[in-house]
Every structure is written in C-alpha cells, then in structure tokens.
Amino acid sequence: MTHVTPLQIYYEDTDLSGAVYHANYLRYFERAREHLLGPAELVRLWRDDGTGFVVYKCELSFREPAGLGDSLEIRTTVRMESEYRAVFQQSVWRPGARAAMVEGVVQLVCVDRQNRLVPLPPGVRDRIREHAAE
C-alpha cells in the first residue's frame, strides 16, 4: 500500500530561479519515511533500544521542478531487501498528474549506538509489510 505525505513548497525551499533546490527532495523524502514509520516509534527505538536508521544508498531522478506555492504529495512504498535493509521507492507528484516530478530510491539500514549494523526491529518490519510495494 502506498503511503502519501502532503508537501507544501515554501519560499525557503526554492533557489534563485524559484525552483525547489535539488537537495531539499532528500529532506522531503526523509520526512515522508518518518511519517510512514511513525515519529514516536523512531524516538522510542533510539531512546529505549539504541537503534537508529542511516542511509546506505540513495538515487534520485529529476523530471520536473517544483516551485514556490506548489501543493504536492510524496508517495512512498517500501520493501525489505534483507533482514538488515529496507528499500524505499519515493516520488513527488502534483495532484492529478500522470507522472512523477521526482523519483528516488533510498536504502536504509539500522545501526546501534556504536554504529554497528543491527537487524530491522520487529515493529519496523511490521510497518514495512503494511506499506510493501505492490
């Protein structure tokens, strides 16, 4: 099931040309992943279990710029690549559009407080199954 996160583009998001600065899409995708996994659960995992997420690999493709005032949505699906890695397919869309403006594939792994690789926690695996790519 696809998870949808609304996105409003503000002045601070744009560059001199009025288009969204390319690196901001990484922030938008991060925010969408946080909403999918649950902000409270991410805080709990770090505080109680010492488990956090880091980006292992990221790839972005830009097809159409977003600009000041745009109301968009981020669509996210996810799959488990292994017991250690989750792969998020993410894209930015205009409502009613036929194609994505920006597409990304972001791979995350979990680490402990010493930055050692650890398996994805059971609760995270459950959320991934809920939003698995169809």
Image (cartoon, grey):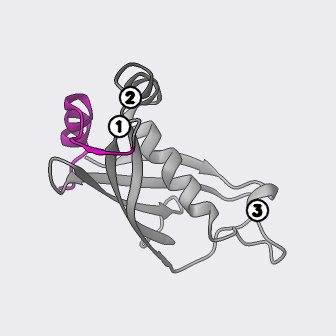
Q: Quadrant of the C terminus?
A: bottom left
Q: Amino acid at mark 2?
A: Gly
**SS at circle 3:** loop
- Of pointers 2 and 1, the one earlier in the residue sequence: 2
Query: Is residue 91 shown left or right of residue 122?
Result: right
Q: CA distance from mark 3 to mark 1?
A: 39 Å
Quadrant of the image occupied by residue 122: top left
Q: CA distance from mark 3 to mark 2?
A: 39 Å
Q: Which residue is mark 2?
A: 50
Q: Which mark is residue 112?
A: 1
Q: Counting other residues with Cα less than 10 Å from the Cα at mark 2, is it few (<14), some (14-19), or many (20 or more)?
A: some
The reply to whether callout 2 and callout 1 are in contact (CB within 8 Å) is yes
Q: Which residue corresponds to the image point at 56% horizontal and 53% vertical from the top-left?
A: 28
What's the magenta region? 115-134
Quadrant of the image occupied by residue 36: top left
Quadrant of the image occupied by residue 47: top left
Q: Amino acid at mark 3?
A: Leu
Q: Which mark is residue 68?
A: 3
Q: Position of residue 129 (x, y in %)?
A: 18, 41
